[in-house]
Image: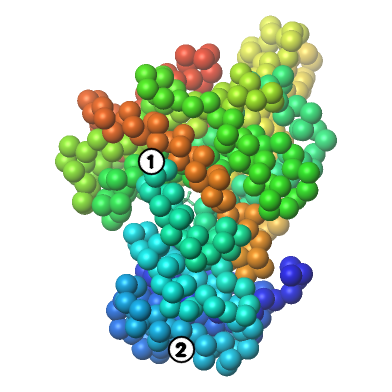
Amino acid sequence: MNTNEKPSALIIIFGATGDLANRKLFPSLYRLFEKGNLSEKFAVIGVARRPLSNEQFQQNIKNSVQSSAQEQALVDEFATHFYYHSHDVTDSASYASLKKMAEDLDSHYQLDGNRIFYLAMAPEFFGTIAIHLKEDGLTMVDGFKRLVIEKPFGHDLESAKALNKQIRKAFSENEIYRIDHYLGKEMVQNIEVIRFANALFEPLWNNRYISNIQVTSSETLGVEERGRYYEKSGALRDMVQNHMFQMVALLAMEPPIKLTTDEIRSEKGRVLKALRPIEGNKVNEYFIRGQYGAGDLNGKTLLGYREEQMVDPRSNTETYVAGKLMIDNFRWAGVPFYIRTGKRLSTKSTKIVIQFKDIPMNLYYQTEQALQPNLLVIHIQPEEGITLHLNAKKAGQSLNATPIKLNFANKGINGLNTPEAYEKLLDDCMHGDATNFTHWDEVALSWSFVDKISAVWENTKEENFPNYPAGSKGPKAADELLEKDGFFWWPMADLEVETC
Ligand code: BG6
């Protein structure tokens, strides 16, 4: 399909009364509608357990999009495209009435039999729903059928394989859109462009010129009401297996021969294949874990993880992970990729720092400051931009060098907020573009890496937990991980993008 064409489709959202649908999906669909990216030929069926009338559901939609809306008439018109189906995901009779409703809407809105099934609900039902959709005839359509599936995709390699087997009974791999919302972020998508559209970087993007790469995703939030899920997940499964690995894959992949879904995914997959497996007694050498205790942030007292709702008071679950990844291929041999992510830290920030090697000889070493290495910083969020750290002459008589920054801030230039990740991903899915979704091979490779770490951590109680206070910069062990190699984490405060 031509990407300028406005696709027609029936979108069936399972979990339509949930948090994700209300906070992300409805507002994102609304923004697409407001921008004219959705044709008149679309309808949404919200599916959830509780009974609701269409009118009540449409009111939910209006409430959910109101804050981002400019025009009431447009909101009202948008909401008329939404219908509700009270549903039992395990009961064929429910699917039969859903099918009838889908067929009616298909002919009413002339949707050409195009269907998107969006699973935004508890993962234990993903497989059951996919199988029912096929067996109860909802996937028998003249147009396209696509399955959008939220994380977590399994809990480990084995459960992911079992889930994949179930959904593959109803959908082929190219009909499955596994969400990793980091891939919808503007600056994550920008990694490829920065790398492959600049003559400046690509020749240097290897172990001859780069000394190490640091990927940080820190959060100020704790586990909120998600204790039950998080206890079984921890930061390793919740953030590393998916988001962090996806960013590393984009940073390390070879240039694809074309910008097609298959070529890009296959290059990313090759990076994950080249990851040096870390297992057994190597785990605690390459990876460290943390758990937050009580603390405070901005004058607010915060509970420790073990005091949160639905959390075991002696929990061994990690809320922080830092690790060193080695990519054993020609380009990256010897270059550590350090990753770290954690909850209840002092700042909300996702950044990538590419640290270049020192120049062979320092002519300026007698200046008051040692020469700083060149850094390329990619600001993913909350600010979006790029900063290149260079050295230049300090103004004045002397020939001293001083660090300078070249900044590009997305907001400063465009004056606009970039689209929210879900808006882009929904748009991609409607156009049949799966590039920014995770392929099964990537899921399987990342689980097989992460499983070896969890095997050790789940079997050894971390006696030092909690090992960082809420609102702090994380556990000390994360600093030691880099110190052993003669590096340090670049302080977040020194890296801020400057908007002028
Ligand atoms: C989700 C995790 O995938 O990503 C959450 O389940 C985490 O625990 C969130 O808070 C972080 O996303 P973002 O976009 O705020 O960095």
Residue at the right extreme, as displayed:
199
- Name the spot of residue 335 as percent of width and height, x first: 61, 22
Q: Position of residue 80 (x, y in %)?
A: 51, 88
Instruction: From the image, state whether disc 1 or disc 2 is nearer to you.
Output: 2
Label 1 crowd bin: few (<14), some (14–19), many (20+), radius 10 Å: many
Q: Of label 1 and label 2, which has the lower sequence position?
A: 2
What is the secondary structure assignment of the residue under circle 2? helix
Q: Residue at x 67, y 76 (%)?
A: 7
Residue 58: image x %, image y %?
44, 84
Quadrant of res 455: top left
**Viewer-proximal residue among 398 and 422:** 422
Residue holding disc 2: 100
Question: Within 8 Å of ligand 1, the CB of disc 2?
Answer: no
Which residue is located at x 37 percent, y 59 percent? 123
In the image, what residue type sits under mark 1?
Ala
Q: Which label is found at residue 235?
A: 1
Judge whether 393 appears above or below 423 on screen. Answer: above
Nearer to the camera, 6 or 446? 446
Distance CA(mark 1)–CA(mark 2): 42 Å
- Residue 301 visible (yes or no): no
Q: Residue at x 70, y 33 (%)?
A: 388
Judge whether 344 appears above or below 3 on screen: above
